[in-house]
Amino acid sequence: MNRNKFIEESLIESADTKKLILEKCSADINKAADVIKECFTNGGKLLLCGNGGSAADCQHIATEFVIRLSHDIKRPGLPAIALTTDTSNLTAGGNDIGFENVFARSLEAFGNKGDVLLGISTSGNSQNVLNAFAKAKEKAMVTLAFLGGNGGKLKSVSDHSIIIPSSNVQRIQEGHITVAHIVCEIVERELFS
């Protein structure tokens, strides 16, 4: 393996993916910011779910909303909860009601009409995220998906989606966190600048 060549190719692929996001996803990014801003303005909360790296992204994104992203803005915390962080809840749910139901059960407990569910899935086919979207619909929540590739099954069941134009999981995940930072910064600047 030629490491320098690999590093160069990886960074170029990442940069090219970001350019494609600009070209293909700008309208969807604006819509996501509008949906989340409206949710907070109306007293709702943002709930997030995903698996693996996407679970980590949920925690990261929720923290940006609760604490803050832009250090030049003094603002109150915004209500965002990662459903991926309570190990007792996740392991009890996985054991007692099946891992495919853990996020739906948390939405049953915490989701309300007007809240937003953000599901993150590189494939768009995670069953526990799909089940969460079904529960969110039952509760009259707005659904937003961060996806990749062709969007998978989640594309057709989400109210709004951002599909990172790549089939490489690493590039999709990098795109998700980049888009999340942009959305968060738009929301906090428009609400509190």
Image (tube, rainbow, N blue to C red):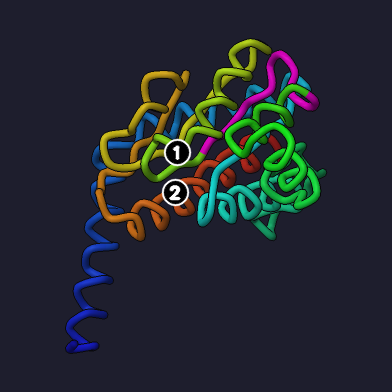
Q: Amino acid at mark 2?
A: His
Amino acid identity at mark 1 = Phe
Secondary element type, mark 2: helix
Task: Pick whichever, 44 or 119, lies toward us.
Answer: 119
Percent position of residue 35, x then y: 56, 24
Answer left or right for 149 relative to 161. left
154 is higher (above) or lower (below) than 17: above
Residue of label 2: 176
Label pair 2/1, CB-CB below 8 angstroms: yes
Residues shaded magenta: 109-119
> For the residue carrying disc 1, how many other residues have a C-alpha within 10 Å: few (<14), some (14-19), or many (20+)?
many
**Residue 174 percent location from the top left of the image:** 41, 57
Among the 4 quarters of the image, the one containing residue 90: top right
Closer to us: 126 or 32? 126
The foreground one among 58 and 76 is 58
Circle 1: element type: strand
Mark 2 or mark 1: name the one nearer the start of the chain: 1
- Circle on res. 29: none
Q: Residue at x 74, y 19 (%)?
A: 42
Q: Which residue is at 59% across, 27% downward?
A: 132
Q: Does residue 185 appear left or right of residue 102 in this picture?
A: left
**Image quadrant where residue 187 sits:** top right
Residue 143, quarter of the rendered image: top right
Q: Which residue is mark 1?
A: 146
Residue drawn at x 45%, y 38% as measured from the top left: 146
